[in-house]
Image (tube, rainbow, N blue to C red):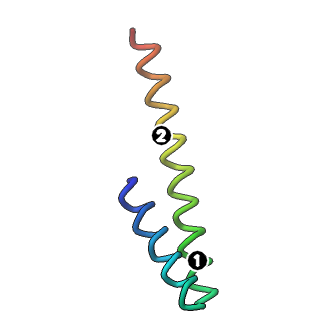
Amino acid sequence: MIRWIIIFLVIAIIAAIFGFGGIAEGAADIAQIIFYIFLVLLILGLLSRLFRR
């Protein structure tokens, strides 16, 4: 999942350099959403590991 975050972040940076505002904004939004999903899954995984012990 981190790979997708990096991919969309790179797309957003490249689009921002070339001035494609809508594309850069969309890719940055997607990268941010995937990052938050990854963060929630990480917290859930840590909590499940804590309660499993």
Say which amino acid is labelled 1. Answer: Gly
Q: Nearer the viewer, residue 48 or 19?
A: 19
The image position of residue 23, as x and y in percent, is 56, 84
* Number of numbered discs on residues: 2
**Alpha carbon separation for disc pair 2 and 1:** 23 Å
Q: Residues within 10 Å of mark 2 (few under 14, many from 20)?
A: few
The image position of residue 2, as x and y in percent, is 40, 53
Residue at left offset 38%, top offset 53%: 1
The image position of residue 14, as x and y in percent, is 48, 81
SS of the residue under disc 2: helix
**What residue sits right under mark 2 in the picture?**
41
**What residue sits right under mark 1 in the picture?**
26
The image position of residue 36, as x and y in percent, is 57, 50
SS of the residue under disc 1: helix
Residue at left offset 54%, top offset 67%: 30
Q: Residue furthest bottom?
A: 19
Give the numbered dot on residue 11.
none
Q: Residue furthest top?
A: 53
Looking at the image, residue 48 lies above or below residue 31: above
Q: Residue furthest front?
A: 17
Side of 26 where 11 appears, left or right = left
Residue at left offset 57%, top offset 59%: 33
Q: Residues within 10 Å of mark 1 (few under 14, many from 20)?
A: some
